[in-house]
Image (tube, rainbow, N blue to C red):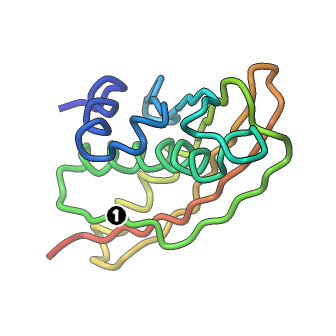
Amino acid sequence: MKLTPSKINTFNLFKLPSVFFTGVRVKTIDDVSCTVSVKHRWINQNPFKSMFWAVQGMAAELTTGALVLMKIRESGKNISMLVSNNNATFTKKATGRITFKCNDGHLIDNAIAKAIETDEGQTIWMTSVGTNTDGVEVSTFNFEWSIKVKS
């Protein structure tokens, strides 16, 4: 079954309600990239009237995690995935609609192949960049995903 934005967003409604209710939505996903959008609203703002960093983090993580999940499903193997490390940089106040994009889908294929071949865990660093409607970067998140074939 192919992952689509609609399927991921429905999954989030039932399994990750905080993602859904703060307005985080997958817009596109393909073999190389995933785009997620979230609009600054009362429910996801901080006391300084900008988007709370954790909401940005959820959106950014979803861009990377959806790609990893999609590639694992395509492999047909039983593989676990976990964020083992992350960091972020905030460069501008996040207001309005913020769009996060990860273009690191190509990194996952090699890691999955190596995990299957060696039966050892692998790690992948993936980056998601958030921009506002003017195309100005507001934040950058890096996530280290660990994957391992389950025995």
Q: Secondary structure at mark 1?
A: strand
Residue placed at 24% from the left, 46% from the top?
73
Residue 89 position (above or below residue 17): below
Q: Residue furthest left?
A: 151
Q: Observer-nearest residue: 3 or 130?
A: 130
Q: Could you tell me residue 93's position as x and y percent?
A: 82, 40
- Inspect the image, locate mark 1, and give the three-letter code of the amino acid beneath it: Met
Residue at position x 59%, y 53% in the image: 54
Label 1 crowd bin: few (<14), some (14–19), many (20+), radius 10 Å: some
Q: Is residue 29 left or right of residue 46?
A: left
36 left or right of 142 in image? left
User: Going by the image, does 5 lie left or right of 42?
Assistant: left
Look at the image and tell me in which quarter the C terminus lies.
bottom left
Name which quarter of the figure residue 67 lies in.
top left
Q: Position of residue 123 (x, y in %)?
A: 48, 70
Q: Is residue 25 above or below residue 17?
A: above
Q: Please state if 73 lies on the left or on the right of 48 as rendered.
A: left
* Residue 110: x %, y % from top left: 44, 57
Dot 1 corresponds to which residue? 81
Query: Residue placed at 24% from the left, 70% from the top?
Result: 149
- 51 and 123: which one is in front? 51
* Nearer-the-camera pick, 60 or 104: 60
Quadrant in the picture for residue 142: bottom right
Counting from the top left corner in percent of width and height, residue 41 is at 61, 29
Q: Nearer the viewer, residue 18 or 92?
A: 18
